[in-house]
Image (spheres, rainbow, N blue to C red):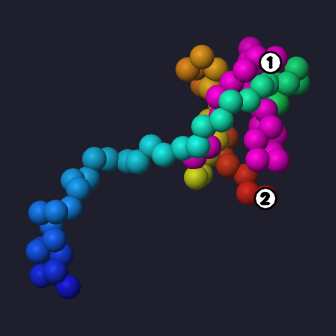
Amino acid sequence: MWEVFEAERPQLVPYAGRFDGFHSVPAAVSKTCLVRFDNNKYSVMASAAGRPVEIRAYAERIEIRQDGRLVGDQPARSR
């Protein structure tokens, strides 16, 4: 197996570090500082209330950003 790996190594893509893959969706923050995503509610900073945000759903966490600023970051919840 090692010989096959060594033979294929020149064609492999070099490791570029951690993959930053996420699903992004726009959302609105309620007056009670909650954002709904995937049938769950996530809390955000009070300064974000009533304004639009961007939700970034990673495999292990949810980031909520407003104008590029992080206003909420929580572990992803499963159904």
| Residue shown at the point (58%, 20%) measured from the top left | 69
Question: Can I make out residue 73 in this image?
Answer: no
**Residue drawn 82% across and 47% down?**
39
Asked whether the viewer can see residue 59, the reply is: yes
Mark 1 element type = loop
33 vs 9, nearest the viewer: 9
Residue in the image at 78% along x and 58% along y: 79
Residue under pointer 1? 49
Residue 68 in percent (x, y) is at 55, 20
Q: Quadrant of residue 56?
A: top right
Residue furthest out toward the top: 47
Under tag 2, what secondary structure? loop
Q: Work out whether 46 lies above or below 38.
A: above
Among the two numbered marks 1 and 2 on one chain, the one whose residue lies closer to the N terminus: 1
In 3D space, how far apart are the residues under numbered discs 1 and 2 (Cα atoms)?
Answer: 25 Å
**Residue 43 occupies quadrant:** top right
Circle number at residue 79:
2
Q: Nearer the viewer, residue 31 or 22?
A: 22
Disc 2 marks which amino acid?
Arg
Give residue 30's position: percent from left, percent from top: 85, 24
Q: Which residues are magenta?
A: 35-58
